[in-house]
Amino acid sequence: GMQVSLIPHPQTPGPDIKISVTVGRPRRQGLSLDYEITGDIADLHIPGWVRWSRADELWRTTCFEAFIARPEGGYLEFNQSPSGQWAVYAFDDYRQGMTHQPGVEIRNGIREQDDGRLQVSGVLDLDRMNLGQGPWRIGLSAVIETVDGAISYWALAHPSDKPDFHHPDSLVLELPPMELA
């Protein structure tokens, strides 16, 4: 996999943590995402475990996100909460035509937490998405809420003066096609 770091938006500097994401393509149409926060975990509001299930509005508190450009235009948005809840949406264009995207499942989900570390990971099964061989263009981000209710916005890149994970220039990571052995 490829390891990258998220940075906070300048307007929302956030708590004293580091967020790294390891991204890979374990199968031709699979995307593995392993988010890890290290640092002052005790300062964070981390949703308690619920179960692996679909849910909406996960971005209202601490949540990890990924955006995947579609070859025909538009993009997918994936949300994964430390609660185990997750969601996938499809957009036709920039913030336009949002629909629930059925047929995407999360596999091998993991949540681990100790004093200085939170790890949330899983593999997105994208078989039905027809994303092609790629390279895939993706954006990675996180919403972080502290125990006092302050929210910071973290991403690979912040192309606009307000936090905007949907901005086309936020999808800065090129994930090469899986090497077929």
Image (spheres, rainbow, N blue to C red):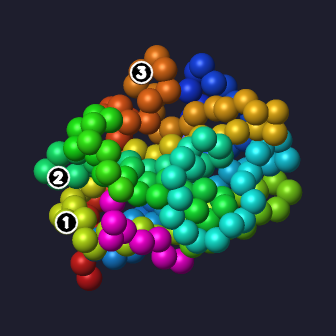
The answer for how far apart the CA atoms under marks 1 and 2 are is 8 Å
Residue 78 among magenta residues: no
Question: Which region is colored magenta?
Answer: 101-108
Q: Which residue is mark 1?
A: 130
Marks 1 and 2 close (CB-CB < 8 Å): yes
Residue 4 is at least partly visible in this image: no
Q: Nearer the viewer, residue 30 or 62?
A: 62
Task: Say which label, 3 or 2, has the lower sequence index.
Answer: 2
The secondary element bearing badge 2 is classed as: loop
Location of residue 83 by image quarter: bottom right
The amino acid on which the numbered mark 3 sits, given as a three-letter code, is Ser
**Which mark identifies residue 160?**
3
**Is residue 126 shown left or right of residue 53?**
left
- Name the quarter where the N terminus is drawn: bottom left
Identify the image quadrant of the C terminus: bottom left
Q: Residue at x 40, y 45 (%)?
A: 139
Q: Which residue is mark 2?
A: 71
* 10 Å crowding of disc 2: few (<14), some (14-19), many (20+): some
Query: Callout 2, which amino acid?
Result: Pro
Label 1 residue SS:
loop
Q: Where is residue 45 drawn, in percent x and y?
A: 76, 45
Which residue corresponds to the image point at 62% horizontal and 65% vertical from the top-left? Answer: 84
User: What whole-number distance in Å separates the C-alpha atoms at marks 3 and 2?
Assistant: 24 Å
Task: Of the two numbered discs 1 and 2 on the same chain, state the one appearing first in sequence.
Answer: 2
